[in-house]
Amino acid sequence: MLLEKIDYTVERLDGDYAYLKKEDGEAAELKCVARALLPGEIAEGSRLVYEMMEYSLRTD
């Protein structure tokens, strides 16, 4: 579903792109996302949530 909540971890940063890994345990490929779409304060290891077509840092 498009509006579901998905948790990610920033695996690596590469220039203008970040590579995200789903935290649900699936062995899926990394998702490449433009850093302009992500919070500015991310770093490798940051935990993100994707909800309502927007990425934000996890607060828990």
Image (tube, helix red, strand yellow):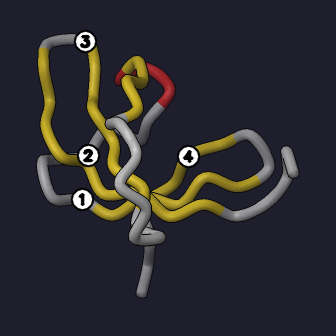
Label ID, residue 13: none
Tell me if 50 is positioned left or right of 20 in this view: right
Residue type of the residue flagged with mark 3? Asp
Within the image, what quadrant is residue 45 found in?
Answer: bottom left
Q: Which residue is mark 4?
A: 55
Q: Looking at the image, is 41 positioned above or below residue 5?
A: above
Q: Looking at the image, is 14 positioned above or below residue 6?
A: above
Q: Which residue is mark 3?
A: 16
CA separation, marks 2 and 1? 9 Å
Residue type of the residue flagged with mark 2? Glu
Q: Which residue is mark 1?
A: 46
| Contact between labelled residues 4 and 2, with CB atoms less than 8 Å apart | no
Residue type of the residue flagged with mark 1? Ser
- Tell me the SS state at disc 4: strand
Disc on the earlier residue, 3 or 2: 3
Q: Looking at the image, is 22 positioned above or below residue 40?
A: below
Disc on the earlier residue, 2 or 4: 2
CA separation, marks 1 and 4? 12 Å
